[in-house]
Image (tube, rainbow, N blue to C red):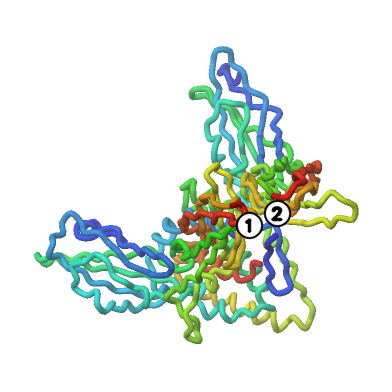
């Protein structure tokens, strides 16, 4: 079956098409709430600078941020059932992914970890520059960018 | 995005994309007249500058080809239309966020069906797209959708179906009865993006078996 | 009774029966003679349990259902622990929630060997597998029924469609068996019983 290969991290048991379908059902609703079309959090430069070796560390930081900050706070903004259900599919599959990401922490990985973290901080920095609600909405609306990037590691 | 007055002159601004040919379309509103003119601008998501689309300024038609301007697979785009009525009323409406990979649909493939005595051969021709690689060469659908595959079905008149599926472009249904009519259906599938083309259909008849006469 | 007001009892004996990735939540019905009782089902995935424990999501199909059961397959969309709860409603009265004693994880589903139908058309060896839904792939093993024959394996992506396996030779006997594989839980079923078929001896 298919699996994610983020560098040397392997993740099975998650069907990326299901995540894309779940987001697809709410994409237009969420993106329509993002009126700031001049700012993109997951900028191309950030994603292109993440090397294969860094990808495991980067995706782990990013998904943790999405779970602990983005989804947690955005849930309070929505009572729309379809959004709740789609988010439940996304967040619970993100939990599966994170639980299976076991990056090595040996010393020689330090520079890679550092570099991956720097890319994550670029994203987080852009997030913090926006008003909270706008940032939450933009981050959720950019899930298709995140899923498209994850697809490169899905084989 | 939609102001109360805007929908009076303008409605349903959206991208319609097929095999990466990206056309912006819109509808007039109840308040617009035949001499209402429209101007199109576009931009990459994350950029601040809107760019005017040459050839779609002050036009009366309600579509604009933005294929060239929205041709990067890794980008997302917005377009907006400004309507100006003869009475000086103006309205602007923005599209949804447009991404090529997720928003384009796939057209039926181009196929040559070749009947033989006991088989039917099917040759699927590559589908080129307006997308170019960094080195300039034109990309096909197979280049773009890594998981693209073809699903072929051959049905005789007794609703019996033969199935073949794969990534290669040449197939042969073998072991068929001579001098019999078959209907072929060939579709392109990109599973990851849940895309499926309409089928290309060919009706063929296997050749009579000369050894039977 | 509570302060003299009839209180609707909460449903009891919640349990989940799961087979081939179809998950059915059942409970003992609340009985009020002459009345129709409706039930509401809600769920929490591991994320909601960890980060939003107050949040319960109404089941896709059973936000108000009569039968004492609910197909929760479309609610369970990740291979994590899920909490499930049910309550009864009669007019303006609603019972307390009853929560499933142990959280449910779909990786505990029972996978049965697939039903297979072997047919031939002329010299075509064709198999049709049970349609178990999009989460199932099938490994089909087939061989020519003679000493030392080599086993062939073919992955079939979906059931319910006749699949051409091989063009057979006259007079030969072919056998096959199949098992299911579910990517989402990374498990496969046992093999089905082998089935065989023979092609008449005279060539065309």
Q: Identify the subunit bearing mark 2.
A: C
Q: Is residue A2 above or below residue C52?
A: below
Q: Residue at x 59, y 26 (%)?
A: C67
Image vertical order of residue C188 relative to residue B16, above or below: above
Residue C165, image x and y in percent?
70, 53
Q: Residue furthest top?
A: C34
Q: Tell me if I can see residue A70 in this picture.
A: no
Residue B174 badge: 1
Q: In which quadrant of the rendered image does the N terminus of chain B lie?
A: bottom left
> Mark 2, residues whose alpha carbon is within 10 Å: few (<14), some, or many (≥20)?
some
Relative to B5, A90 lies left or right: right
Q: Secondary structure at mark 1?
A: loop
Foreground pick, C174 / B72: C174
Q: Quadrant of residue B105?
A: bottom left
Give the percent coordinates (x, y) of residue C63: 53, 35
C150 vs B94, nearest the viewer? C150
Residue B18 screen position, x and y as percent: 41, 65
For image coordinates 28% across by 77% down, the residue present is: B53
Is residue B167 in view?
Answer: yes
Identify residue for label 2.
C167
User: Is the C-beta separation of discs 1 and 2 under 8 Å?
Assistant: yes
Is A22 located above or below residue C128 in the figure? below
- The relative height of residue C5 versus residue A80 in the rendered view (above or below) is above
Query: Do pointers 1 and 2 mark residues of a single chain?
Result: no
Residue at 57% across, 29% down: C39
Q: Residue furthest left?
A: B87
Q: Quick one: label 1, few (<14), some, or many (20+) residues within 10 Å?
A: some
Q: Secondary structure at mark 2?
A: strand
Relative horizontal placement of residue B60, taking residue C131 as reference (left or right)? left
Q: Residue furthest front?
A: B213
């Amino acid at each position: 079956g298919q699996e994610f290969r983020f560098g040397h991290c392997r993740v099975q048991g998650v069907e990326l098409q299901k995540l894309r379908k779940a987001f697809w059902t709410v994409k237009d609703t969420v993106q329509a709430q993002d009126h700031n079309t001049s700012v993109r959090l997951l900028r191309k430069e950030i994603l292109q600078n993440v090397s294969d070796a860094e990808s495991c560390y980067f995706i782990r930081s990013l998904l943790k941020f999405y779970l602990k900050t983005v989804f947690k706070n955005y849930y309070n903004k929505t009572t729309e059932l379809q959004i709740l259900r789609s988010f439940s599919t996304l967040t619970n599959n993100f939990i599966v992914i994170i639980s299976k990401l076991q990056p090595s922490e040996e010393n020689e990985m330090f520079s890679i970890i550092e570099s991956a973290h720097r890319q994550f901080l670029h994203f987080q920095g852009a997030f913090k520059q926006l008003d909270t609600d706008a940032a939450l909405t933009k981050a959720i609306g950019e899930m298709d960018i995140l899923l498209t990037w994850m697809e490169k590691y899905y084989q | 995005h939609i102001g109360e007055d805007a929908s009076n002159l303008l409605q349903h601004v959206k991208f319609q994309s097929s095999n990466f040919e990206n056309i912006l379309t819109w509808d007039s509103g109840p308040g617009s007249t035949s001499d209402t003119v429209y101007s199109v601008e576009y931009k990459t998501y994350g950029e601040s500058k809107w760019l005017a689309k040459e050839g779609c300024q002050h036009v009366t038609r309600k579509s604009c080809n933005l294929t060239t301007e929205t041709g990067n697979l890794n980008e997302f785009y917005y377009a907006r239309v400004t309507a100006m009525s003869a009475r000086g009323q103006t309205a602007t409406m923005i599209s949804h966020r447009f991404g090529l990979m997720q928003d384009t649909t796939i057209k039926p493939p181009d196929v040559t069906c070749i009947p033989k005595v006991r088989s039917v051969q099917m040759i699927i021709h590559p589908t080129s797209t307006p997308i170019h690689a960094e080195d300039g060469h034109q990309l096909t659908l197979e280049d773009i959708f890594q998981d693209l595959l073809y699903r072929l079905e051959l049905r005789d008149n007794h609703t019996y179906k033969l199935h073949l599926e794969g990534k290669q472009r040449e197939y042969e249904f073998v072991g068929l009865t001579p001098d019999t009519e078959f209907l072929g259906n060939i579709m392109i599938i990109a599973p990851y993006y849940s895309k499926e083309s309409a089928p290309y259909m060919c009706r063929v008849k296997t050749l009579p078996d000369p050894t039977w006469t | 009774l509570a302060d003299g007001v009839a209180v609707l009892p909460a449903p009891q004996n919640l349990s989940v029966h799961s087979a081939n990735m179809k998950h059915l939540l059942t409970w003992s019905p609340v009985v009020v003679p002459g009345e129709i009782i409706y039930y509401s089902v809600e769920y929490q995935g591991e994320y909601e349990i960890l980060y939003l424990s107050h949040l319960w999501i109404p089941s896709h199909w059973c936000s108000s259902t009569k039968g004492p059961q609910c197909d929760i397959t479309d609610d369970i969309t990740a291979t994590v622990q899920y909490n499930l709860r049910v309550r009864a409603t009669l007019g303006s009265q609603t019972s307390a929630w009853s929560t499933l004693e142990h959280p449910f994880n779909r990786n505990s589903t029972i996978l049965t060997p697939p039903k297979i139908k072997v047919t031939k058309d002329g010299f075509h060896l064709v198999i049709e597998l049970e349609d178990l839904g999009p989460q199932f792939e099938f490994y089909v093993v087939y061989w020519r029924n003679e000493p030392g024959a080599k086993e062939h394996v073919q992955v079939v992506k979906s059931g319910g469609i006749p699949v051409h396996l091989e063009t057979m030779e006259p007079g030969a006997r072919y056998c096959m068996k199949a098992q299911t594989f579910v990517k989402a839980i990374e498990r496969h079923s046992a093999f089905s019983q082998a089935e065989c078929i023979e092609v008449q001896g005279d060539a065309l």
